[in-house]
Amino acid sequence: MHVIFTHPRDTSTYDADITPECTGQEALNGLIETKFIEPSAGTSAYSLKAASTGKAIPPSQGFGEAGIKDGDAIAVLLSESGARG
């Protein structure tokens, strides 16, 4: 299936052909390998969300199981955790 990933910090996108069995973590690993996103560091972590439904794609869940369809846009989100003061 063909999906479009959106960058967490700018308006760039990355088109990818993935299998329905591809997991959220495998997709993130691939996006890092292709240098679309930087490896997360410190307290930052990436997550994926289907743009059409707003549903999160857990790291261990396959895209097919998450209900992702051919042509869907997937938002790559960057979250930072930890104390702020």
Image (spheres, rainbow, N blue to C red):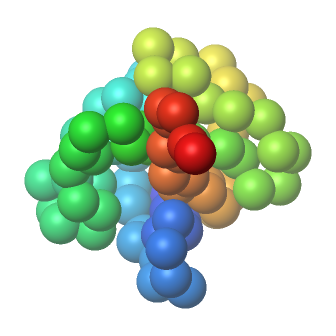
Q: Please state, as top left, top right, bottom left or bottom right, where the C terminus lies in the image.
A: top right
Residue lying at the far top of the rendered structure: 60
Residue 14: quadrant of the picture: bottom left
Q: Residue at x 28, y 54 (%)?
A: 31
Eyeballing the image, is 17 above or below 50? below
Q: Residue furthest bottom?
A: 11
Nearer the observer, 4 or 54: 54
For this orientation, the residue located farthest to the front is 85
Question: Does residue 45 sit above or below 6 in this rendering?
Answer: above
Q: Where does residue 63 sit, x and y in percent of width and height? A: 55, 31
- Residue 9's x, y, as percent? 49, 74
Residue at 53% x, 17% y is: 61
Task: Residue at 38% x, 61% y: name it.
Answer: 16
Horizontal side of 69 relative to 42 (left or right) equals right
On screen, 65 above or below 54?
above
Taking the view exactly as shown, the residue that stands out farthest to the left is 33
* Most foreground residue, 81 or 17: 81
